[in-house]
Image (cartoon, grey):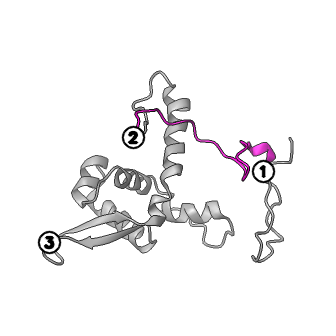
Amino acid sequence: MGRKRFDEMTCSIAQTLNQVGDWWTLLIVRDALKGARRFSDFHESTGIAKNILTDRLNKLVENGIMVREEVGVRGQRQEYVLTQRGEALFPILIAMQQWGDQWIYGQENKPDELYDTRNGQPLGQMAVANESGDEVTHHFVATRPASGENDNSDAPDNIAANGS
């Protein structure tokens, strides 16, 4: 039985899940962000079955998240490289790791510490901010039609009730 797709749902989260919502896919992107490029790199790191890895890499290429680059003799070896679209998943994966560090492992037991290689400083906790830089929680987020976009009258107005 295949996973549910959200093709008809007008929701950026649902459409993102259509492209990267599979757990193997995000682990492949994680490894690519760490420098993995070859099929064997992804296979060794994740332990994913080769047929599933092939499928996920093909979908990442189809969705413009990665590109295949020929290396050496044409058609005999390829590497997979993140596109700008793929690299834009970086904050999502950092937020997921920080969530896991806090809520699964606890800060004292987290398996790895994220740090800035330029100065050795640990990364700060990911947060959502408005355009002024003020931190925002879900209590103060609502939606409205984007300028120039179609009115989505059957979409909910609020992610959460304002101020509740």
Residue 112, image x, y percentages: 40, 32
Q: As displayed, is residue 94 above or below residue 125?
A: below
Outermost front residue? 119
Q: Which residue is mark 2?
A: 118
Q: How many numbered marks appear?
A: 3
Circle 3: is it few (<14), some (14-19), or many (20+) Cα within 10 Å?
A: few
Residues rendered magenta in the picture: 117-140
Viewer-side label of 1, 2: 2
How far apart are labels 1 and 2 at the CA level? 34 Å
In front: 41, or 116?
116
Residue 45, image x, y percentages: 28, 47
Q: Which residue is mark 3?
A: 72
Q: Is disc 1 in contact with disc 2, using a CB cutoff of under 8 Å?
A: no
Q: Which residue is mark 1?
A: 141
Say which element carries label 1.
Answer: loop
Q: Quadrant of the C terminus?
A: top right
Residue at 51 percent across and 62 percent down: it is: 3
In front: 39, or 112?
112
Mark sitting earlier along the chain (2/3): 3
Say which amino acid is labelled 1: Val
How far apart are labels 2 and 3 at the CA level? 33 Å
Image-based side of 118 in relation to 93, left or right: left
Q: Is residue 43 magenta?
A: no
Residue at 31 percent across and 48 percent down: it is: 46
Residue at 35 percent across and 70 percent down: it is: 67
Say which amino acid is labelled 3: Gly
Residue 149, image x, y percentages: 75, 76
Answer whether residue 27 is visible to the viewer in this image. yes
